[in-house]
Image (spheres, rainbow, N blue to C red):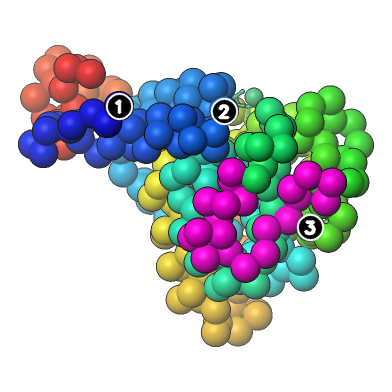
């Protein structure tokens, strides 16, 4: 059933994204738990003001620099990422010359194939990690996410993991890989364990990252390395948490909700 979202609705964008996820769930791309995980993300997006905050712009720049200086960068894709940002995954992969690999917590052959189809429709030429191709194993991981493609994540030096689980981020980091995460929750284990955490919604972060990588593509290696040297993930996460705190302080001080940005009413 397609739900009509009134044009002037104050939360139209957020509702449109929900509809997209529900449709992708019905098409077998998104897992049931993926719908719930999105809700957790939405809550943090609400606290951040539903916009890309300054520390996230900086993290995006560092992420682009890391991907562009990597030997073997891989973009790991799950159901939610495919549903919300497939075309930008493809654009980014082209800009930084990365492989795209399907990697799922709730792995089924149908869902892997459904995600591969979404990515291919968005223009991906090669999608790793589907079915028997994910024949290698990441040590120390219990879930199905330990299965990886020997041509992709297994041999990658840098892995971009939008919407990742904490255990896997840690396992990849232990294997010596540099992990870039996109996670709206600056407190999650993923956010804390990644080398670079972009605290932003994937729907905004992925287009921005693809565009930034395109812009930095012809930059000298030493300039890219300088960007990386100036970046400190713990400090960046601290700034995100402080932004939330300051925003809440300001709002609570005013004692009213009238000045919340773009229609944050409580109808939905
Ligand atoms: P962790 O395992 O890292 O400790 P968690 O268990 O709290 O995190 P998971 O359910 O494993 O969370 O993963 C979902 C994560 O993805 C949440 O941290 C949530 O904030 C984030 N998330 C969900 N939707 C989005 C989105 N659209 N953009 C960015 N982040 C999102
Ligand atoms: Mg988790």
The span picked out in magenta is 114-133
Q: Residues within 10 Å of mark 2 (few under 14, many from 20)?
A: many
Tag 2 secondary structure: loop
Judged from the image, the secondary structure of the residue bearing numbered disc 1 is: loop
Which residue is found at the position 42% from the left and 59% from the top?
208
Q: Nearer the viewer, residue 157 or 98?
A: 98
Label 3, ligand 1: CB separation under 8 Å: no
Q: Which mark is residue 152?
A: 3
Q: Where residue 9 appears, x then y in whole percent?
A: 12, 32
- Counting residues from the start of the chain, the first of labels 1 and 2 encountered is 1
- Above or below residue 84? Residue 101 is below
Looking at the image, which residue is at 44% across and 45% down?
84
Q: Residues within 10 Å of mark 3 (few under 14, many from 20)?
A: many
With 150 as the anchor, is 182 left or right in this view?
left
Left or right, 28 with reference to 254: right
Residue 107 in percent (x, y) is at: 71, 32
Asked if labels 1 and 3 touch by Cβ distance under 8 angstroms, the answer is no
- Give the residue at mark 1: 1
- Residue on which disc 2 sits: 31
Q: Is residue 225 magenta?
A: no
Q: Quadrant of ligand 1?
A: top right
* Residue at 12% over, 17% down: 256
Q: Earlier in the sequence, mark 2 or mark 3?
A: 2
Check if mark 1's residue and mark 2's residue have beta carbons within 8 Å.
Answer: no
Residue at the spot 39% in from the left edge and 24% down from the top edge: 43
Q: Nearer the viewer, residue 205 or 231?
A: 205
Kindly identify which numbered label has been placed on residue 268: none
Q: Is residue 64 or residue 229 the one in the foreground? A: 64
Q: Which secondary structure lies at badge 3?
A: loop
Q: Residues within 10 Å of mark 1 (few under 14, many from 20)?
A: few
For the image, the number of numbered tags is 3
């Amino acid at each position: 059933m397609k739900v009509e979202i009134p044009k002037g609705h104050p939360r139209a964008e957020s509702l449109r994204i929900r509809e997209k996820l529900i449709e992708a769930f019905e098409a077998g791309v998104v897992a049931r738990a993926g719908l719930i995980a999105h809700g957790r993300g939405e809550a943090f997006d609400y606290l951040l003001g539903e916009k890309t905050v300054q520390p996230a712009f900086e993290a995006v720049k560092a992420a682009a620099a890391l991907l562009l200086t990597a030997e073997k960068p891989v973009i790991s894709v799950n159901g939610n990422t495919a549903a919300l940002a497939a075309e930008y995954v493809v654009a980014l992969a082209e800009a930084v010359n990365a492989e795209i690999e399907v990697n799922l917590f709730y792995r089924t052959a149908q869902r892997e194939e459904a995600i591969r189809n979404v990515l291919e429709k968005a223009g991906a030429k090669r999608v790793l990690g589907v079915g028997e191709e994910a024949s290698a194993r990441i040590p120390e991981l219990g879930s199905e996410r330990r299965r990886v493609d020997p041509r992709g994540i297994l041999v990658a030096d840098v892995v971009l993991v939008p919407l990742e689980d904490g255990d896997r981020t840690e396992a990849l980091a232990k294997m010596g890989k540099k992990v870039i995460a996109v996670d709206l929750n600056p407190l999650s284990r993923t956010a804390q364990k990644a080398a670079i955490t972009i605290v932003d919604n994937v729907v905004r972060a992925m287009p921005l990252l693809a565009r930034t990588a395109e812009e930095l593509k012809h930059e000298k290696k030493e300039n890219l390395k300088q960007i990386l040297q100036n970046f400190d993930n713990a400090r960046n996460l601290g700034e995100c948490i402080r932004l939330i705190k300051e925003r809440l302080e300001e709002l609570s001080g005013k004692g009213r909700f009238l000045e919340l940005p773009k229609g944050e009413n409580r109808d939905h």
